[in-house]
Amino acid sequence: MLLNLEWFRTFKTIYETGSLTSTAQMLYISQPGVSLHLSNLESYVGYRLFDRMARKMVPTERAKVLYNFIIDGVSRLEEAESHFHKSTDTDRATISIGMCMETFQFTLEQYISSLPFNVSIRFGEYQAMEEGLDNGSLDLIITPRQGQQTGMEYTAFSRERIVLVSGGQQDSKVFGQLIKKGEYDEAEKWLKQQRWYSTAADMEHLRKFWHNNFDKHPDFRPNYIVPNKCSIVRCLSNEKGFAVIPDFLCRTELKEKKLRLIWEGKNIMENTLYFGKRKKTMFAREITLIESFFKRQSMV
């Protein structure tokens, strides 16, 4: 069997996302194709690379060794592919941007078709984005972390507040009265009896909000697990239930009363968002245009 370098790209993506479905979406191939790449690579190297759990692909110890061995090489190949791929218009630059999916859907998605240059969007963990900026595979990242890498600059441009919202049909008078009286234990018990929405991959906001305001871990399972936070906004609009999400994602729905702002918390949670980029870049004009779209939506 001949080694196919695409197997390594597929392996790297599975390792970073922990999901065959997410890998298929990111690489624009079918899920059976992802499974075939992984099966072929496992046959080639002669050992299992992942333990298949119910909701996550967990790398084996040998997979960790393989990942560390190939990551630099695969990243460099992806960088070469991004910068040297021939397009129908050879004068068009290609800008690679890293951000979370919700930020893309809310801010940049509506402008993509009007851009006078090519754009490659990458979703992933913030640490991986910083590494992509370091190794040249990304030109711009949108992140709540202010990195300290040499030769990079991070510029604050917006602030998001993590808030408790409900659907427009939800009656939350009891909760409001309990909070007003300072009866936080009773308020927490009441909330835990309600319908909750969250995402499969990220419950960090819910956990932090709960800990900051009730000094406890949220020991309940949300009723509805949806793909991302934008899905939460759509599913919860004009319905009943609760979610903890960044306020910038639902400004329109709150204004139209499809959602209700229930509580900002006794300890307000805010994140500053940064543009991360190299101090010296050949894509300064293109990056400035991208940044302008985000600033239009900024709350600062």
Image (cartoon, rainbow, N blue to C red):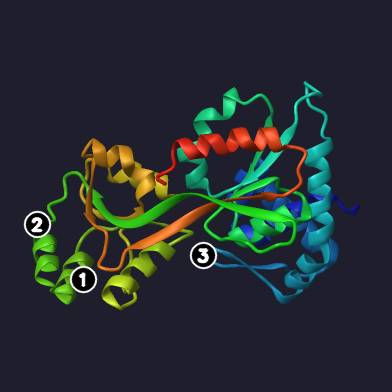
Q: Quadrant of residue 180?
A: bottom left
Q: Relative to 143, is 264 on the left or the right?
A: left
Q: Is residue 102 visible?
A: yes
Tell me what residue is drawn at x 68 percent, y 33 percent.
Answer: 285
Numbered disc 2: secondary structure: helix
Say the numbered circle drawn on residue 188.
Answer: 1
In the rendered image, the quadrant that contains the N terminus is bottom right
Callout 2–callout 3 Cβ contact below 8 Å: no
Q: Earlier in the sequence, mark 1 or mark 2?
A: 2
Say the numbered circle drawn on residue 54.
Answer: 3
Residue 178 horizontal/vertical position (percent): 11, 68
Tell me what residue is drawn at x 67 percent, y 49 percent.
Answer: 277
| Viewer-nearest of discs 2 and 3 | 2
Q: Is residue 90 above or below residue 197?
A: above
Residue 176 horizontal/vertical position (percent): 12, 61
Q: Earlier in the sequence, mark 2 or mark 3?
A: 3
The crowding category of the residue bearing disc 3, from other C-alpha atoms within 10 Å (few below 14, some 14 to 19, many at least 20), is few
The crowding category of the residue bearing disc 1, from other C-alpha atoms within 10 Å (few below 14, some 14 to 19, many at least 20), is some
The crowding category of the residue bearing disc 2, from other C-alpha atoms within 10 Å (few below 14, some 14 to 19, many at least 20), is few
Amino acid at circle 2? Lys
Numbered disc 3: secondary structure: loop
Residue 238 horizontal/vertical position (percent): 22, 40
Numbered disc 1: secondary structure: helix
Q: Relative to 156, is 159 on the left or the right?
A: left
Q: Is residue 84 above or below residue 261?
A: above
**Mark 2 sits on what residue?**
173
Amino acid at circle 1? Glu
